[in-house]
Image: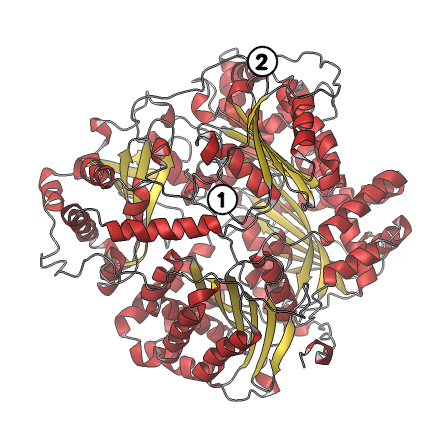
Amino acid sequence: LIYLFCCFTKHKTLNILNNNMSQSNEKETPFLQEETPTPILTPTTPIPTLTPTTPKNSSTTNLESSQQDDREYKLITLPNKLTALLISDPTTDKASAAMDVGVGHLSDPENTPGLAHFLEHLLFMGTTKYPNENEYNVYLSAHGGSSNAYTDMEATNYYFDVSADKLDGALDRFAQFFVSPLFQEETTERELQAVDSEHAKNLQNDAWRDFQLSKALCRDTHPFNKFGSGNLLTLKEIPEQLGLDIRQMLLEFHATYYSANIMKLVVLGKESLHDLEALVTQYFEHVTNHNIQKPKFPGMPYGKDQLSKRVHIVPIKDGLRQLKMNFPTREVDTLYKNKPTQYISHLIGHEGKGSILELLKLKGWANELSAGESRSCSDWGCFSISIDLTDVGLEHVDQVVEIVFAYLLLLKREGVQRWIYDETATVSACSFRFLSKRHPIDYTCSLANAMQIYPSQHILSGPYLIYEYDPDLIQTFLSTYFTTDNMILSITSKTFEGTTKLKERWYQTEYTLEDLSKDLCDKWTNASIDSDLVDNMLHLPEQNDMIANDFELRNVQDMPKDEPRILIDDSRCRLWYKPDNVFDMPKVNILALLRTTAASTGSVVDSVLSLLWTEIVNEHSSDFTYLASMASLHSSITSIQRGIDLTVSGYNHKAHILLKRLVDTMVTLPDKLNQSLFDRVKDKVSKKYHNFMFSQPYQHALHAGDLCLEVTKWSVEDKVKVVDSIVLQDVIDYSRRLLSRFHLEILIHGNVSSEEAKEMSSILLNGLNPSMPPPSILPQLRVVDLGEGKEYVHRMPESNINNTNSCLEIILQVGALELKPVSALALLHQLLKEPAFNELRTNEQLGYIVHTSVKTSGDDIKGLLFLIQSDSFDPLHIDERVEAFIERLRSKIVNMTETEFQSNVSALIQSCIEKNKNLGEETNKYWNAICNNHYLFKRLDLIASELETTTKIDVLHFYDRYIAAESPHRRKMSIQVFAQQHMENYKKPVGDGCTLIYPEDVEEFRRSMPLFSLPNKVDLEPMKLP
């Protein structure tokens, strides 16, 4: 999160709206994350004719890489001093490149805040060689690619991916951004609106507000004080008042800072290192080198006058109660071999016995705690301790801080412990040794940034490994920086509303700033673990018994490589098994679904109880799950529509131990649950529901759409009413009812034998011991059938009255489809997604968030989704513009050349058959097929086969039947979220044949509508092992 706060992302490919968003049920299944390091937070000239060149570059291949990494690496420096890392991976089906330019928003001119970010937006839009502003994105989209960029404080990162055989053309277009961008006048004016809309999107976001307030509290002479996002005021109105030409300033900024010698390029492709070097040299040797020094910002942003302060902050979200202790430090990038802050954050952020969080939970004062670097710049850093408080904890802020300082004093007095260092170093070494491949676009983006930080030999390993033990350095950090004199204490709560005296300029955050009293600082400085407050409840953690040391690989024969098989199938349990015969990693993913209506689909009361229950289980297990997570063995227990989802993933050596402990915790919950824990978790869940009201309008629209279409979805408003009435005995009774009857569906995938998989399933089945469930308690996800030729509009006011953004979601419901029409729908979306973004976002500037996707409701009901959030237009206008785009779409497809059409077909086929990058990705694919009940593990391959014979006529027939406005078969649901500034049209009548639904009408609407039939039962006999 901290990393994202420092970035201003151009959402060409929206991170916040990933592919799972379109799968209303699949999004609820666990996403198995592979190990990744914690993020350490010219005037245009004609282009010379590009001809193939023989590389004459300085180079090295001496990079420390993981033992599991079969890719080849080479680091080269072009004659213009641009450094490039080449990665040859003959097995990749996606190529990618990323350019990290060593300049960010700290280098903005004083009179134009946001200029670096604005330049990042405009760089994509036309170059001398490729003047069409959409050329780059059209090329990528037609060849299965995507692009994005972000502006950080000291760097700007641009990255893309594309089908592996189309790297040459993509690199050609990409390179021109750094050679001769146009920054055309018309484009400049238009994209100003996009930057302003992006800022408007963030105005009601507490994370962005907190980040900017931290900048406002520093010395006003330090560049960190700047407003990096920018808006119309800073990039248009003020420059015009000062007589400045913003386009000329962009050109000057590019000419000054976009210099080859501070650029770091990463290119990954299937080509050999020699061929990659030739491509990079051909396209990037023309980037101008101004031989500039990378911008530096010496001096600390916080001096004596800015430190030892208390800040009271009024948030947007009602339920946000946060205490944050910020300690500015020296820079830490050059200390990567020692990583002193990693040792400190491991201990402060510990959740096991003797930890700060355990004591705060026992007192009922906190729910969560995190600690680590929140800022990491080239000249300074910041270590933050963030604590999520309860209402009672908010009344004991000074005591909470005292407990933290008591623990800090304990660390100082006990001294640095070699065994703790050895544990963290061992786990880090294992993580790097068994590092899984990531998606190329993620890998190149992170490596390009790493090249700005680490020396060449440690670009790959530097974020992971701890090379040197330096106890004196750790002790120096503790004694020098973790003091009351070097702290800014902030408390965020709605209770401060009406009492604050100051207002931050850019986000209008209300706050109060005052000095910490000397008496209080002295008390904290002398805090002790043997005080009455702490009562010796704080101590160093136990040794971690969950660290794996057996990495032997199982050799399982005669199993398919692309789908699991059934080992057990009876009235209580079905066990799916798939050995890791693809990646050869000593890891396992254990996923179990307790299928029951008691979790969420039965009633809104059960839905709330299931969330309370899972939160309490997680609380009861936090001491051992935290130790396991520190050993790269992760777990989760969550409530989803289909039941309770349990996941264990990581090294297989001790996965069964963690699984057994989780099962024991679930079973013993009724005997161990106490009133104090129940009250704290109930308050946490209640605040979670309340906080949703302050989410982005697009999230409210998505929730409202699912609420209208899915019979077993419950409104947040109803959940808020229910949670207040639930008492402790309700949860105890619910726990016994929940675990008494359910059907257990398990997938075990990884480095285990079939016998070991059966033993793991026995831990679940024997430990939970459910009775055979009757069919009536197995969940069925029913979906409303809107009816052919029907149109519905669901209008709702934006629940956060201060959010200026409205939102429109259009769902064109299609229904359950066979593979052939599914391929036509997928191809139709492939053809429209890029022009939709270009026309609705780039040209018409309807809003900053413009998204399209194929949507799945329930298990199998397909549709086409449009989603636009705007602070400039109301939903009615946006709906009109989307319909106009849909009307133009048919002729666009008709006029598309056969070559262009086939390029899109090939891109979509490539996307369908794209290889899994790691074990977690493979597991997710199988688990989604299991949870959605279709068990088509090769579904994407089958769709790819259908696409081979899908023609333009097929797509047009699909469009005419389901998408065209005049079609008698069209089903449309429009979700319209109105911000206060757009409410004048809220009551405007809808057209003939359209039904208007207000929030109070949703439940009646669902009851009165027909439902799609459930999918046919799948014959699983052929998938059983003998």
Query: Tag 2, which secondary structure?
Result: helix
Q: Is residue 691 left or right of residue 554?
A: left
Kind of residue sitting beneath label 2: Gln
Residue 628 placed where, x, y %? Answer: 38, 62
Residue 549 placed where, x, y %? Answer: 40, 60
28 lies above or below 1023: above
Residue that numbered label 1 is attached to: 803
Q: Residue at x 33, y 31 (%)?
A: 331
> Could you tell me which quadrant the C terminus lies in?
bottom right
Which of these two is toward me, 64 or 339?
Answer: 64
Q: Quadrant of residue 961?
A: bottom right
- Numbered label attached to residue 918: none
Q: Residue at x 33, y 64 (%)?
A: 545
**How many numbered markers are drawn?**
2
> Could you tell me which quadrant the N terminus lies in?
top left
Residue 836 placed where, x, y %? Answer: 72, 41
Q: Is residue 465 left or right of residue 642?
A: left
Residue that numbered label 2 is attached to: 248
Q: Dot 1 surroundings within 10 Å: few (below 14), some, or many (20 or more)? A: many
351 lies above or below 497: below
Marks 1/2: CA distance? 34 Å
Q: Residue at x 53, y 82 (%)?
A: 742
Q: Is residue 991 left or right of residue 415?
A: right
Numbered disc in front, either 1 or 2: 2
Q: Quadrant of residue 690?
A: bottom left
905 lies above or below 350: above
Q: Earlier in the sequence, mark 1 or mark 2?
A: 2
Which of these two is toward me, 933 or 515?
Answer: 933
Kind of residue sitting beneath label 1: Asn
Which of these two is toward me, 534 or 868?
Answer: 534
Q: Residue at x 20, y 54 (%)?
A: 396
